[in-house]
Amino acid sequence: MNQSFDIAVVGATGTVGETIVQILEERSFPVTNLHLLASSESAGHSVPFRGKNVRVREVDDFDFSKVQLVFFAAGPAVTLSFVAKASAAGCAVIDLSGALPAAQAPQVVPEANAHVLAGLKKPLQISSPSPSATALAVALAPLRGLLDIQRVNVTACLAVSAQGREAVSELARQTTALLNLHPLETSFFDRQMAFNLLAQVGKPDAQGHVPLEKRLVGELREVLGMPALKVSVTCIQAPVFFGDSFSVSVQLAGPVDLDAVNVALEAAEGIELVEAGDYPTAVGDAVGQDVVYVGRVRHAVDDTSELNFWMTSDNVRKGAALNAVQLAELLIKDLL
Amino acid sequence: MNQSFDIAVVGATGTVGETIVQILEERSFPVTNLHLLASSESAGHSVPFRGKNVRVREVDDFDFSKVQLVFFAAGPAVTLSFVAKASAAGCAVIDLSGALPAAQAPQVVPEANAHVLAGLKKPLQISSPSPSATALAVALAPLRGLLDIQRVNVTACLAVSAQGREAVSELARQTTALLNLHPLETSFFDRQMAFNLLAQVGKPDAQGHVPLEKRLVGELREVLGMPALKVSVTCIQAPVFFGDSFSVSVQLAGPVDLDAVNVALEAAEGIELVEAGDYPTAVGDAVGQDVVYVGRVRHAVDDTSELNFWMTSDNVRKGAALNAVQLAELLIKDLL
């Protein structure tokens, strides 16, 4: 396949957008022309790609017919403003914002439901799920056939980088202030984030669920192809810059064979299984890596029909940018 | 009750021991003479009590017949070395080390199973459970009668202070080094604790469970009086100095009425229920307080038979020192 493509990245100056550009280069994605797009505020900046600085232009003025594929790595509002224009111009869309309904743009994680792509009709629109759903789908996919999964219980400890650069610098600023016994100032977070855990990421609805948690449940069910799966999730904000960590408990119909689980995880795409006794951490293992790290695979204390494990994942790479580029690689192989 | 007592605190120079002394003063516990004891290394230090500095003496030389009540706030080894001597001398024992078997010294949390004390025979020996079990028992006790609890799933995010002063200073040291771009040094923790989460607190057995997790399950079942309760727990070490946080999911036989749950929690001893939409944090709410803070009380997304909530507790106070002093208050009321 010697074909090469013109690509656009919307939201190119954001953490995820920049990482998409970096991964396109790392994986030698066949790019002829790369168009980096952003809002008027960010236009004018430039992002390095293959040794050159590529200038970021305003998305509003962009002619999408110039490209065959566009990544939407900005917020839902930006996707909703331009996706129709992009599709009308005939280019394939990979959206990372969660703005598009499943019926229009299915959620896909290559390791879990790549088969969905074969059924797509043009104009091609695909969603890359939220970082948490993506990482969990990678870890649970190889267990689907092996185990009769009744219920998944997750506490997701999220890195502040998922909230963007402001959140990262506020964690650093708050931490420095506290260590120097200076008064704490909060602006991005509504309270102390340093040396603390926040139980709620986003604004809860009347039922007490935040959009992030509801999105995760829906995406996980869709990607795993288990629409009735019971998922209980709490997303908390941890004082960690990069890398998400997950405490996962999977309830099964009967006793689970841990050896079989380990063999399945060991053999699975996109997973690094950490040996028993040890465990992965966000900072020490996941950050900067393309795989989801899984460890502490065990039964619950006194209950062999409950499987517990711990996992960590780079929320910006595998959780978002890498998954989107993997989707693009599958698209150009079979569909473009 | 004008009676007053001679009290000994073993492990008086530790975080919990010092806090026991502080709480005895705060709650005007009827103390005639306070004997502060520790290992030979710590003997000679002094701890403030009622405006005086009380000198800490060696536990080895202590004559337990001088006191009617002793708190064991050091490690299990210390308790095991001196508990027989203390009981033989006729003084009541409150152990915080988890060293004594349930048959010998029942685990008690006043808000959950104070009735157990009435059945005790002399020599009185009582265990104050681990901080996590104590906090969880306080929160779950008022729900026992209300709900048909099938299973409890907990991710406990523990503060480093539970590991003692060394752990606290290493988190501060690591954080400062990272913010100043100095090389990271680890001594107490086996890897980076700052801006990271460690999935394992202690050394796991062949089944992958750490003693802390097994202890928590056993203690929670005993204190709640639910020996068959299914408990799935993961204890993780968070980069937080003080205050434990818990993501809790309770599975019930049928749909749960959230209003009834809120009413029960609101009315319960030792609980501060945070209003819907808000949530408590370790640093902002729990630390320095005597109650367990509960918030984010909600159903699981799309599953009304699963109750989710978040809770925070001061691991040194309510989790240990305060619970022990509360036990002492009940002892002197009815049993001494």
Image: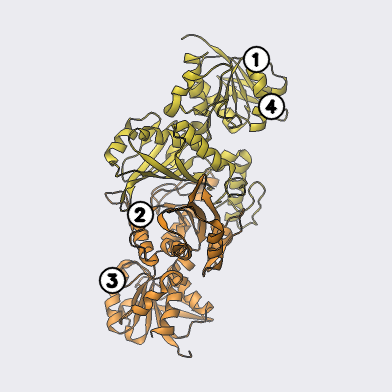
Chain colours: A yellow, B orange
Q: Which mark is residue B202?
A: 2
Q: Residues within 10 Å of mark 2 (few under 14, many from 20)?
A: some
Check contact, mark 4 vs mark 1: CB within 8 A. no
Residue A154 in the image: x percent, y percent?
A: 45, 45
Kind of residue at disc 3 = Ala
Label 2 or label 4, whichever lies nearer to me, is 4
Kind of residue at disc 2 = Gly
Q: Are marks 3 and 4 on the same chain?
A: no
Q: State how far apart marks 3 and 4 are (Cα).
A: 68 Å
Quadrant in the picture for the C terminus of chain B: bottom left
Residue extending farthest bottom: B2
Q: Chain of mark 4?
A: A
Q: Are marks 2 and 3 on the same chain?
A: yes
Kind of residue at disc 1 = Ala
Q: Earlier in the sequence, mark 2 or mark 3?
A: 3
Find numbered disc 3 in the image and state the secondary structure of the residue it sits on.
Answer: loop
- Lateral position of residue A210 relative to residue B102, left or right: right
Q: Which mark is residue B103?
A: 3
